Image: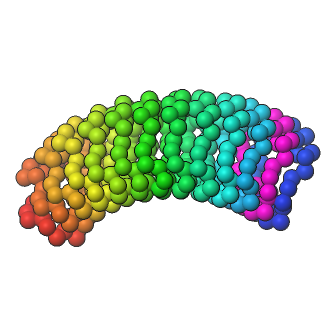
Amino acid sequence: MNLSYCESIESLPTTIGDLKHLTELSLQGCENLKELPQAIGSISLLSILNLSYCESIESLPTTIGDLQHFIKIRLQGCENLKEFPQAIRSVSSLSILDLSYCKSIESLPTTLGDLKHLTELLLRECENLKELLETIINTSSLSILDLFYCKSIESLPTTIGDLKHLSKLLLHECQNLKEFPETIGSISSLSILDLYYCESIESLPTIIVDLKSLTKLKLRGCENLKELPETVGNISSLSILDLSCCKSIESLPTTIVDLKHLTKLKLVGCENLKELPQTIGSISSLSILDLSYYKSINHY
């Protein structure tokens, strides 16, 4: 059932619970919809619920936990949604939870860790979200964690290292994130680590070199990052390294030449980088070397 952009709808009839064969319900853009009826939990075959940009919704019915075939719930842009029901723990089949742009959410339910089949947790621009819970470890199937512009987060739980299937960790513009737990080196499946404009980060944990599946390391705009670990050359799968606008970096570790699969090295606007390693020419796979807007470099 597609009721997207029916902007005058303020409520749904309780009889919607009688639609026993309904599998998809889209209410995207119903900006005046204030709530869902408790009867929503009676739609036993519902697998996809799209409430994106339902800006008037402040909470969800507890009966949402009765939806045993639930796979995807999209709440992107529900700016007034303040909390998520603890009953979510009962939706064991849920694989995608999209809370992007839910700017009023300050915390996640402690029962989130009970979602054993959750593969994508999208929290982009949840700017008042203060922390991730240690129980995130229990979402053992998680492959994508998107914390883009979660500017209130200052640290990550140490248990993040137990997410053995995590392939993408997106922390773009987490401006107050100051450090990483050492346990990040245990995420053997991680292929993309995005730290663009994480302006408070001054160093990376040396254990990052244990990320053998890492192909993209994005550090653009980490203006207080002073150096890369000397052993960065051990990240054997790395193909893209973006250090653009890392204004505090003065040199690169000599082991960077050991990155045999590196194809792109971006150093745009690294104002204080004085030189490149003399052996940079030995990276035979390198196809793009971007040195635009240098001020301090002497030779390469």
Q: Is residue 287 visible from the viewing direction of this image?
A: no
Residue 117, above or below 216 = above
Q: Nearer the viewer, residue 130 or 95?
A: 130
The residue shown at (33%, 35%) is 182
Question: Which of the 4 image quarters holds residue 156?
Answer: top left
Q: How many marks?
A: 0
Residue 143, above or below 8 = above
Q: Nearer the viewer, residue 40 or 174?
A: 174
User: Percent position (x, y) of residue 222?
Assistant: 32, 57
- The C terminus lies in quadrant: bottom left
Question: Which of the 4 image quarters holds residue 206?
Answer: top left
Is 72 positioned to the left or the right of 193 in the image? Answer: right
User: Percent position (x, y) of residue 74?
Assistant: 66, 49
Is 237 positioned to the left or the right of 42 in the image? Answer: left
Q: Is residue 71 visible from the viewing direction of this image?
A: yes
Is 173 positioned to the left or the right of 120 in the image? Answer: left
The residue shown at (74%, 60%) is 56
The residue shown at (35%, 45%) is 179
Indicate yes or no whether the magenta region holds residue 170: no
- Magenta part of the chain: 27-52
